[in-house]
Image (cartoon, rainbow, N blue to C red):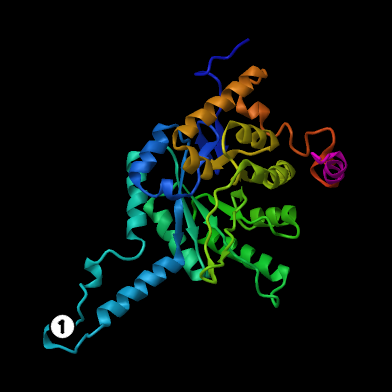
Amino acid sequence: MTIEPNTFDLSTRYLGLDLAHPVVPSASPLTGDIDHLHTLTEAGAAAVVLPSLFEEQLEHEAMAMFHGREWSSGSFQEATTGFWPEMEEYNSGPGPYLELIRAAKRELKVPVIASLNGTSRGGWTLYAKVLEDAGVDALELNIYLIAADPEVSSGAIEYRYLQLVQTVREAVTVPLAIKLGPFFSSTAHMARRLVEVGADGLVLFNRFYQPDIDLERMEVVPNLVLSTPAELRLVLRWMAILHGNVACSLAATTGVDGPEEVIKLVLAGADVTMMASGLLRHGPARLAQTVDGLRSWLQERGYESLAQAKGSLSQKSVSNPLAYERANYMQTLVSYSPPW
């Protein structure tokens, strides 16, 4: 029996939030203002993740304002408090971000998830509470920690993650997702421990942007390269391994460009798939194209809902679970034939 598109059940549940389907714009410049957010939701976004609020940026703004207010203060009778306006009259701190949250909650009909990127334990907890008070439906901790110090062990790094998540969990009550990097020595074990200390969801994976070297200027420079579907494999493997092994929501990000990637990740066990580069590359219309492609693929194969397909090719569900581990590695090596 053919199921009509308007009755086919693509709904999913993420961080305790009921979503119409699993395609969500992740944190990017596209989610940074209310006009773009309207465009994305009109194109079919099931929820939105706002850009990260960076603790360093807030601290830099605060210090710049402090030095500006104090410059020449008292040097002239006409300027006893410096040449800058009083702090309460100046737009500093997280104000614009909080206004974006309020506008999104007021004007959009989908869940609004804030992203936070902190540097200190106090900063994480302070701004997590501030974002919760602004009315977000959930909070994503964008943990960007490069383990560059050779004196710091992997165990110490993991402890910092766990301590951070536990501290934020104790400070807020909204659902909490952790955006992880892929470089833990035991990702599955770390995932379980994060859930134990309070994570409601995991986002696989944080794409750590890599610096480049400018040969003309002889400088280290930033280099933003949009992700491609070729980067999906790492996310796909760990999604399939973690599905059914951790008691939390699972979101996939990096390499999600269209319906094919979303289908694969859902089959592996993803509750939600997040797009950034795909939307930046193709535009907001890519959302509707992706949802339509997902629906058509499932219907053509006789599925009655997204839930029926979710996790059907996870490690626990496939006939050869080792396909996600070493067996796949060996088979790949012996099966490749060079074109020459």
- The kind of secondary structure the magenta stretch mainly shows is helix
Q: Quadrant of the N terminus?
A: top right
Q: Eyeballing the image, is 177 above or below 311? A: below
Q: Is residue 191 left or right of residue 12?
A: right
Identity of the residue furthest to the left in this view: 78
Q: Residues within 10 Å of mark 1 (few under 14, many from 20)?
A: few
Per the image, label 1 sits on a secondary structure element best described as helix
Q: Quarter of the image holding residue 214?
A: bottom right
Q: Is residue 320 magenta?
A: no
Residue 109 at what x, y percent from top left? 39, 36
Question: Which residues make up the magenta segment?
Answer: 327-340
Q: Is residue 111 left or right of residue 310?
A: left
The residue shown at (58%, 54%) is 178
Q: Which residue is mark 1?
A: 79
Q: Quadrant of the C terminus?
A: top right
The residue shown at (37%, 42%) is 36
The residue shown at (63%, 58%) is 197
Residue 3 at what x, y percent from top left? 58, 14
Residue 58 at what x, y percent from top left? 40, 67
| Residue type of the residue flagged with mark 1 | Ala
Which residue is nearer to you in this view: 132 or 29? Answer: 29
The residue shown at (69%, 59%) is 183
Residue 308 at what x, y percent from top left? 66, 26
Image mark count? 1
Identity of the residue furthest to the bottom in this view: 75
